[in-house]
Each structure stands twice: as structure tokens, then as C-alpha cells.
Image (tube, grey):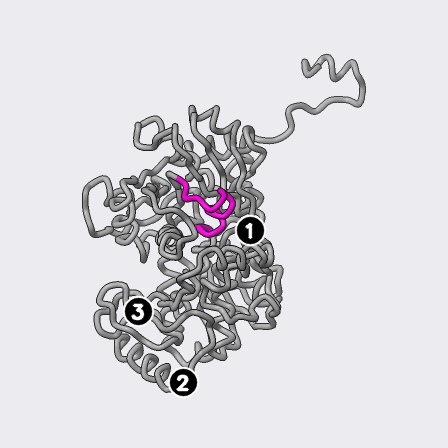
Amino acid sequence: MRRKGLAIMAAQTATRTRTDLGPATGLSCRECGTRFELGPIFACVECFGPLEVAYELPLGDPEALRARIESGPNNIWRYAPLLPVPADVADKPSLNPGFTKLVDARNLAKALGVTGKLYVKDDSGNPTHSFKDRVVAIAVEAARAFGFTTLSCSSTGNLAGAVGAAAARAGFRSCVFIPHDLEQGKVVMAGVYGGDLVGIEGNYDDVNRFCSELIGDPLGEGWGFVNVNLRPYYGEGSKTLAYEICEQLGWQLPDQLVIPIASGSQLTKIDKGLQELIKLGLVEDKPYKIFGAQAEGCSPVSTAFKAGHDVVRPQKPNTIAKSLAIGNPADGPYVLDIARRTGGFVEDVDDTQVVEAIKLLARTEGIFAETAGGVTVGVTRKLIENGQLDPSLTTVVLNTGDGLKTLEAVSGDTGQTAVIRPSLDAFRAAGLA
């Protein structure tokens, strides 16, 4: 029944006139290669494999393309020639995310024993303080192109806030779905934009299944689910992390990247972005390694990697890193392929290590990361200790969100050093002088 529904959507898409999404020429199945016209479909009707955007990229003159990018706005729209968006995208109402800081993390490097260059790509500087603003911005353009009136998503928290904010700015109605027990900071941030915020009893995988059912029901007509029926376009937003990192490194590839894994889409799209930069001649082709980071309480990809498996077996999440708590990650098998192809690794850390890493990053670089950032920094430390990550090379670690969203993780033993009377004698007595 679901395959039939997808076939109907594909047929309807084929009858549309050419959709203006810039250099995007269609959709291609990642498994069997079947091509489809641009439309709100996400799975191949031939093999049920995932679809991704195919392009006609501006090959032939890398210097001109580099100059065009560098003269663009200081957000993701500087890369519009490489994204599924119309040429005039920068003129439309948007949160204009991207071009966040690449922090030269010298203090963290010293603490971890890194002798090469260590950078933190800090995406907490985006409008709703997570990398999700990037992917949603691309999905909004697809929603406009396909005539949707409501933006929706299944979310572990950050995406709900990003959709709510982007919808408010772009003039869409929003209705987003989250697990009922998310961190309060993420709940408030997702609800403040005025859209509908619906808690679902269960974990993220339960929420995602519900959204998949809603898409096939008349109740969902006119709805663009950014990470379901708009997923091929949404995922492309993560490529901009690869573009920015390389541009900020002086148009060079890093030697190693450590990337958190939830669905796995971010990691796979960063790799796609790096490959595109090589193909376009914007960076010199050289080997790089990609490492994936998971929380031990939801580590289906790292478990499969360490066991040498090609199939990722679902797990029931049980971790404080709720933004990564996807027990059945859609892109898990592709993450395994990339880690193995590049000579990387997929590792996990427990909740105690996550909290320690959050504090380490804060105390060395002044960056307060949410739990996903704690996972990434904690895994980086573990990879170095185990000899899997070379500390002499140039390494980029991703922080994808702001710690103010996950205060519960560190609030138990973090707070006032002392409470004293307003006098110098009291200050001296407290031993703080």
C-alpha cells in the first residue's frame, strides 16, 4: 500500500512543469540509480531506496566559482550555485543561517594531546542555535516550489525549533511532532514561535512512524514534512558545513572530521559536499578520514561498525543525548560505508563521558555545547586515546547545538561556587581570594 502511494506521488510529480530549484535536475535513487523528476518524494518506487538530489554543477572554471562564492552573503546562500534553491533565494524571507565560526581550539588541543591543528565548527551560532537551521532553510525552498502551506517534522528537539522559526519567518503554518519527554529548553524553544507543537507518547522512532502515516492520510494534504517527503532537499543543507569548513581553512580539506550521528544524514552529506568540492576543483584532492560519534545508550551504528556488519540493527534509546537518540537511523548503512572507505571509525561514549566532555569544551574554549557536542568531543578524546585518530593532523570536530537547550545534563553539579555576605571578610573566609 505504501509503495502504491509513493508511485502515485511520483506520477503526479512527473506531470508538473519544471520546478525551479537552481542547479538541481532531478532525484536519483541511492541504491539502484533510478531517476525521478523533482518533487516531494523520498523513496524509490523500484527498490524503496532513498532518493537524493542530482545536479548539473558549474564545472570548468573553479577560480570564477570560488570568486562568486566569496562575494556572496555571509550565510549558506553564498553556496546557492551548489544547492537545490532558486538563484534569487537570498532575496526571500529566511533566517539566513550558516557561515558559523570555525574555532581554532588550541586549549582543547592541549588538553587532548593534539599536536596538529584542532578546530571546532561551532554551529550553535545559527539563528535557533543548532545546525538544523541549515537543513530547514533548504527544505523551505522546496516547500515553496511544491506549493505546500504547512511545514512539519518529526524531531528530537532542535529540528522542531528550527522548523517553527523558519515557518514563522517565511509565512508558513507549522505543526511539529516531538517525543513527549524532551528537555524543557527544547520544548519551550520549539513552542515560542506560535506553531502547533505536539508531543507523542514514545521515542523518536515512534514519532517518525506517526509522521509517515500522516503523510499518506488526507489530513496531511498540503503538508511538507522537512525530514520525510522533503528529505532529499533537506539533507542537502548539511553539505554547507563541508563547504564552509573548507573555505574557512583556505579552500583546503581537513585531514580528519568527527561528526555526531543521529539519523546519519549529516555525516553522509558532509562527505558528499567534500566530494563535490573536489570534483569542482575548489579544493585539492587528498585523503581525509571521517569519524562518527554516538552515545553508548543509542549506538546502533558504532555497534555495527565494530562488529564488521553492513546491517544496522535498531536499538531502543537510553541516553541523555536525546538529539542523537534515533534507534533506527535511516542513513546508518551509508555511514558505515563512508567510515570504512575513508579509513575512519565509529565510536561511542557513555553519559558520564558526555558530561565530562561538555565541561571540558566549556572550560577550554568557552563553548557551551549541548549533549550532542559532548558526544563528539568525548568520542574525539576516546579516538585519540585508542590510537584511531592521529593527533598530529588537522582535525575538525563538530558542535551542532547550544548547551542552553540541555541544561539538565550539567546542572546537577554546576552552579555557584559559594554564597557569601557582601563583605571582603566573607570573601576571604570563603577561600576565594
In magenta stretch: residue 303: no
Label 3 is placed on what type of residue?
Ser
Name the residue that disc number 2 marks. 16
**Local crowd at mark 1 within 10 Å, few (<14), some, or many (≥20)?**
many
Tell me the residue at 26%/48% (across/down): 336
Q: Quadrant of the N terminus?
A: bottom left
Q: Which residue is mark 3?
A: 28
What x and y, as percent, mark residue 131?
Answer: 50, 52
Q: Which residue occupies 59% across, 54% down?
A: 74
Image coordinates for residue 151, horizontal then vertical, percent: 51, 70
Q: Residue at x 48, y 37 (%)?
A: 119
Query: Where residue 261 sits: x, y (%)?
Result: 37, 48
Left or right of 94? Residue 233 is left
Position of residue 232 in the picture relative to residue 171 (left or right): left
Disc 2/disc 3 C-alpha distance (Å): 17 Å
Q: Is residue 22 above or below residue 75?
A: below
**Stretch in magenta:** 241-254
- Residue 346, placed above or below residue 203: above
The mark found on residue 33 in the picture is none
Residue 246 in the magenta stretch? The answer is yes
Residue 314 in view in this figure: yes
Depth check, front residue: 151 or 36: 36
Which residue corresponds to the image point at 37% horizontal and 39% vertical from the top-left? 256
Q: CA distance from mark 1 to mark 3?
A: 28 Å
Residue assigned mark 1 = 99
Q: Secondary structure at mark 2?
A: loop
